[in-house]
Image (cartoon, helix red, strand yellow):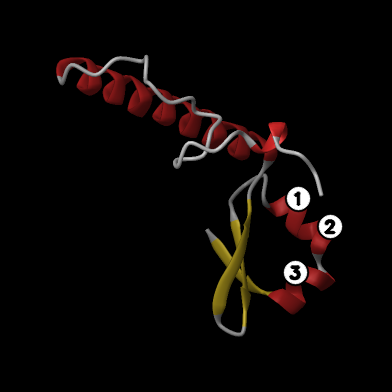
Amino acid sequence: MKFIEEAEAQARLDEILDETQQQPIVIRRQGRDVAAIVSARDYERLRALNVQSFLGLREEAAREAATNGLTTTTPYSTSTHARGRRPLSSRKRR
């Protein structure tokens, strides 16, 4: 991973975009990391991993809920406020 200052990133954007095909680049502003640039290929790979991780977590939560006797049917609609209010979409506009 390469680190560069914001001013350099602004001045050399075309070159930096090419460099991201080889390695991610972190942009720093006043000594703090503020952004990371990755290739589109790496971004898609990371995105797919996040989706897989989320789906695994969801399945784990469902198994735990089933083990504890919870079901997917609840007495409250997910589209209503916790205090039993009507969904915002059905309220009159002022």
Q: Nearer the viewer, residue 30 or 53?
A: 53
**Element under label 1?**
helix
Ranked by sequence position, the earlier of labels 2 and 3 is 3
Q: Alpha-carbon distance for marks 2 and 1?
A: 7 Å
Q: Could you tell me which residue is drawn at 56 percent across and 82 percent down?
A: 31
Q: Which residue is tagged 1? A: 18
- Which residue is drawn at the image coordinates 47% and 31% (left, top)? 49
Amino acid type for the residue under numbered disc 3? Ala
> Residue 90: image x %, image y %?
70, 31
Secondary structure of residue under mark 3? helix
Badge 2 element:
helix
- Residue 34 in the figure: left or right of residue 16: left
Are the two marked residues, 2 and 1, in contact with CB atoms closer than 8 angstroms?
yes
Q: Position of residue 91 (x, y in %)?
A: 71, 37
Identify the image quadrant of residue 70: top left
Q: Amino acid at mark 2?
A: Asp
Residue at image x 40%, y 30%? 53
- Residue carrying label 2: 14
Q: Is residue 1 above or below residue 86?
A: below
Dot 3 corresponds to which residue? 9
Looking at the image, is mark 1 or mark 3 earlier in the sequence?
A: 3
Q: Is residue 53 left or right of residue 90?
A: left
What is the C-alpha distance between the residues marked 2 and 3? 9 Å
* C-alpha gap between disc 1 and disc 3: 12 Å
Q: On screen, 71 above or below 91?
A: above
